[in-house]
Amino acid sequence: MPFQIRSQLIKMVFLIAMCLLANSAFAGTSTELRSSSQTSAPYSLELSAKEKVWLARHKTIRVAFDDSLPPYSFVDQNGKFSGIAVDIFNALSQKLPIRFEHQPRKSWNQIYRAVAERRTDIVATMVDRPERRLLFNFTHPYLTKSLAIITRKNDTAIKKPSDLAGKTVAYILNYQYAEGIKKKHPSIKPHVVKSMRECLQSVSTKKADACITFVGTASYLQTEYRLSDIKFAGFYERRTADESIAVRGDWPILAGIMQKGLDALSEAEMNAIYFKWVPPPAVAPVVAKESPAPKSIVHTIKTAPPRREENYWLSTWPLLAVVGVVGLWTLRVRLHHRHPVPPPQNPFSPDSQTVTASPNDFEEMLLKRATELKNRDTRFRNLIENQSKNYFFFQCDKQSKITYVSPSVSAILGYNPEKFIGTFQNRITDHPENIRISRLLELCRQGKPCPPYALEVYDSDNERRWLEITSEPVYDEFGNCIGVDCLVFEITKRKQEDERLIWLSFHDELTGLANRRMLVDRLQQSITMAHRTRMSLAVLFLDLDGFKSVNDKMGHAAGDYALKEVAIKLSGIVRDSDTAARLGGDEFALLLPDGDEAAATAVAKKIVDTLNKPIAYGETSIQFGVSIGIALYPRHATDSDALLHYADASMYYAKQKRLGYSFQAES
C-alpha cells in the first residue's frame, strides 16, 4: 500500500477516534438534560374512551411556569415564556388535543394558592415530594437538573466540591439548594447574588472563585452573554432535581394523559428541544498548527513533522490497535444486546450429537421429546395453579392480548379466567402509576430489562386492589420474542401500609393535622418565597390553658376527644393555603404564608373566641382557654428555627399576662 494512502487511512481512523472521545466527554455533562422517560422507539399514544370524553370537556389547560430559570423556563425580553419546558409543552399540544394557556408571572406562593383554588391546572416543572402529593398528582420525571461548579478558565485548583473549602463561592440565596451548600461547606465565603447570570459574571469579574448553578443554565448563559473566560470545572451534585409535571389533585386523569403525551415524544424530538437551548459541542478539527481556540473547551491537535514511513507506522500502530479493539468490543456488545437470548441449537442439525441413523429412531426421539415437554408443562401448571392464595400467572402474546391465566386469579380478584381475559383492560383504574404498563410490556417484548411494577385494578366487587407484576419475555426457537409471561402478587395491604407510613411521616396520627416535620418544611418554603416576593408571613404558636386538668379529671379519652375537636376548629378557621399543625401534647401551630400583622391578629382573635367556648362531651362539657404567641417574618426573625422560638416565647408571655395572644416575647 502506498505511503500516502496509508497516511490518509490512519488520519481517517484518528478522526473517528477523536469523534468517539468527544462524544463520550459530552455524554458526561450535557446529556443530563435528556428526558429519562424515552430511550427507544416512541410510544404509540392511545387515549381511553374515558380520557377522550374528559378532554372534550376540558380543551384548555392552564399551565404555570417558573419565570426565572433559563434555559429550562424563563420570561424573555418580549415578556413571553421561553425555554425547554415551554417547548416541550408546545410539542405536547401537537400530540394531545389540548390547548395550553400560559398563566401570568407568579410567585411560587401564588402558584400554590392558584392550584388550591382551582385557578391553575398544571405546574410545568416540580419535584415530586410526599408532602406535595396532598395537592398535586405527578407524572414521571422528564427533566433532570444537576448542579455544576463554574470557575475561571485558568483555575486548576477547584475541580470537585471538597476543593471549595475556604473559597469565595457565588450562589443565589433564594433557591432551595443554597441552604444545603452552607450546611455542607461551612468554611466557604458566600457571595450572594440575585440571578444566575450575576452568579456567572461574579466569577468572570473575580468577585468569586467559583459559582454553583445548574449545568444547562451555565451552558446557556455562557453562550448567550459570551462569557469566554469561565469553564465547567466539575459537578457539584448530579441529579439535584428530577422535575415532573404537577397536576392539580382533583384531576388524576389529566396526570395520566400528560404521561401518555410525554411517552409519545420520541428521543429525537426531546433531544431536538434540548439541543436547541444547549447545543452539543463541536468536535475539534485536526489542524497543522496549534489552534487559537480556548484550550478549556477543546484541546487542539498538533501534527508532527513528516517522518519516514517505517517510523510513522511504529508510532501509530498502538492507536490503531486500541481503536480496533474498541470497535470489535462495541460490535460484540451491540450484537449481544440485539439477541438477548441466543437461539437454541437445533437438535437435528449436523452439529448436534443426536444420532439420526434411522426413521424409527427419529420418530422415537420426537415422541420422547413431546412426552417430556408435556410432562414438564403439566408440572409447571400444577405448581402455578395450586398456589391459589399467593399469586396468579398469565401470558400475553406479542400484541398484548392475554392468552392464558391461571385459575388462582379467582381467589385473588374474584374473576373466573375467561372473564379476566375478556375484561382485564377495562378493569385497570385511572391511577397515574398505571400509565406505565403498556410501555413496560413493550420493553419486555423487545427483550429489554423490565423491573417489577405495580398496577392498580378493580376486583369483581369494584374494590381497588394493587398488584405487583414480574414479567419475562418468551422466545421461539429462532430467538424471536413471541410474548410475555407475567407472575402477579397481590400487594394491596403492603401498598396501603407504605402510603400510611409516608402519611404518618408528615402528619399527626391523632388529629390528622400536619406534624412538626411538615410545618418546618413548609415554613422554609414560605420563607424562601417571602424573601423572593418581599412579602411577610406569620407563625402562631398555641397552647391550651388548663388542658392538663381535663386529662386528670376526665381521663385521656376525653383529652384525645378535645384535641380532635380543636384540630377540626382550627382547620375551619385557616385557609387552604395555610398550615395547621399539632406539635405534641396540647401545643399547636399555624403558618400563614402571606400573613401580615393585621391578618395574624384577626386569626388569633377568632381562635381565642372559638376555643374559649365549651366542647360538648357526652352529657358533660370540656372547658379550657388558649394562649397564642405570634412571630412575623422578617420583623422578628428570618429563619424557621428563630421564628418558631420567638412565637413560643410570645406564647409564654401571653400566658403569663393572660392576654389571649401577643406579638411580644418579653417585657
Image (tube, rainbow, N blue to C red):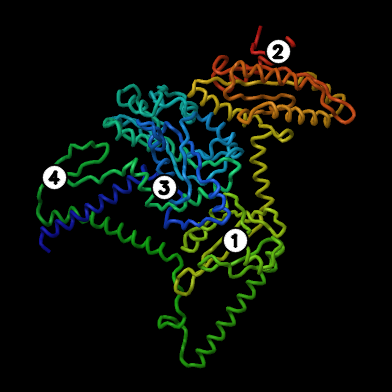
* Point 74% across, 11% down: residue: 658
* Point 47% across, 84% down: residue: 354
Q: Quadrant of residue 206?
A: top left
Label 1 secondary element: helix
Residue assigned mark 3: 91
**Residue depth check, mark 1 versus mark 2: number of the one nearer the observer:** 1
Q: Earlier in the sequence, mark 3 or mark 1?
A: 3
- Image height check: is 603 above or below 373? above
Where residue 269 appears, as percent x and y from the top left, is 38, 50
The C terminus lies in which quarter of the figure? top right
666 on left or right of 442: right
Where residue 356 appears, as percent x and y from the top left, is 46, 88
Q: Quadrant of residue 462?
A: bottom right
Q: CA–CA distance between discs 3 and 4?
A: 45 Å
Q: Nearer the viewer, residue 126 or 295?
A: 126
24 on left or right of 468: left
Q: Earlier in the sequence, mark 4 or mark 2?
A: 4
Q: Earlier in the sequence, mark 1 or mark 4?
A: 4
> Which kind of residue does numbered mark 1 sit on?
Gln
**Residue depth check, mark 1 versus mark 4: number of the one nearer the observer:** 1
Where residue 116 appears, as percent x and y from the top left, is 59, 34
Residue assigned mark 1: 425
Residue assigned mark 4: 288
- Image height check: is 311 above or below 362? above
The N terminus lies in which quarter of the figure? bottom left
Label 3 secondary element: helix
Q: CA–CA distance between discs 3 and 2?
A: 58 Å
Q: Earlier in the sequence, mark 3 or mark 4?
A: 3
> Which kind of residue does numbered mark 2 sit on?
Ala
